[in-house]
Amino acid sequence: MINRLIEPTDGDIYFNDKRLIDYNLKELRLTIGYVLQQIALFPNLTVAENIELIPEMKHWSKAKRRERTEELLQKVSLAPEEYLHRKPAELSGGEQQRIGILRAIAAKPDIILMDEPFSALDPISRGQLQLLIKDLHKELASTVVFVTHDMNEALLLGDRICVMKEGKIVQTDTPEKIRSNPANEFVAQFFQQEQPVLANDTVDALVELGFIVNSLVESETAVSLGTSLPEVIRLLTAGSDVMIVDEGKNLGQITERSILQFLETKMEKGGQSDE
């Protein structure tokens, strides 16, 4: 309904204080990025052509489109010289979904719709892309509407969470408030899902690999070397500055980039297949 693939039977949806029904349909959809669970890259187009599709429809110059494409590929650790001219069939599942995300954000949309985009991926690829989305969201400042059945994913990514059951809203609140005070048993059950990605990894791994930031930032949130990375992610999601303290000594700060770097390293070492 947000991009008007389906028109609401009743009521109104507003964007910038204007009813969606009052927007020109083509112009509306050009301001909305869309990432599907099935990825849905055009198989006959190259990586570059897939990413540049909406910028081309918005009449960006060829030079500007290519500059944007190369910039985005570098952000997701895909070397432009290696990937620009590949076809989707030549990419792994995780790589295809990266391209799907880049296609959605290439023209810097006001809204990005993400319909369970990572549910078909392995846990390591999924965790890596979750942190990528969090990173890109900060940079783009776009509104992201993200559908998921995984409460761990919702807690990691959401500023606000809306829990629905059978088409009705059960609870809407910040992640921390939903975590600490679920409205009913249905909401509470989401926390009984499988352990999140990195469940067996601890802060020690970040220190050993040098994925921490030297910082003199004063923070009330300090973790020890044995702290699990899911706990660190929870603290980061809550907006805390997370410092590592060992025997009273400040070893440095953990950032979301630290977690992303660790995930990328785990992928490169073959923590799990990207297929």
Image (spheres, rainbow, N blue to C red):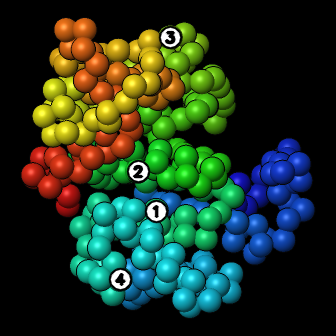
Distance between the alpha carbons at the discs numbered 4 and 1: 15 Å
**What quarter of the picture does the C terminus occupy?**
bottom left
Distance between the alpha carbons at the discs numbered 2 and 3: 26 Å
Left or right of 237 on screen, residue 16: right
Left or right of 174 on screen, residue 58: right
Foreground tag (4 vs 3) = 4
Q: Which residue is mark 4?
A: 84
Distance between the alpha carbons at the discs numbered 4 and 3: 46 Å
Q: Secondary structure at mark 3?
A: helix
Q: Earlier in the sequence, mark 1 or mark 2?
A: 1
Which residue corresponds to the image point at 46% horizontal and 76% vertical from the top-left? 69
Residue contact between numbered discs 4 and 1, judged by CB atoms under 8 Å: no
Q: Earlier in the sequence, mark 2 or mark 3?
A: 2
Q: Amino acid at mark 4?
A: Leu
Q: Earlier in the sequence, mark 2 or mark 4?
A: 4
Q: Amino acid at mark 3?
A: Ser
Q: Position of residue 264 (x, y in %)?
A: 23, 51
Question: Dot 4: within a 10 Å radius of its alpha carbon, few (fewer than 14), some, or many (20 or more) residues?
Answer: some
Q: Earlier in the sequence, mark 3 or mark 1?
A: 1
Q: Position of residue 88 (x, y in %)?
A: 32, 78
Res 98 seen here: no
Foreground tag (1 vs 2) = 2
Q: Earlier in the sequence, mark 4 or mark 1?
A: 4
Q: Amino acid at mark 2?
A: Leu
Q: Which residue is mark 2?
A: 132
Q: Which residue is mark 3?
A: 180
Question: Dot 2: within a 10 Å radius of its alpha carbon, few (fewer than 14), some, or many (20 or more) residues?
Answer: some
Residue contact between numbered discs 2 and 3, judged by CB atoms under 8 Å: no
Q: Which mark is residue 150?
A: none
Which residue corresponds to the image point at 45% horizontal and 18% vertical from the top-left? 218
Residue contact between numbered discs 1 and 2, judged by CB atoms under 8 Å: yes
Q: Is residue 245 above or below residue 263?
A: above
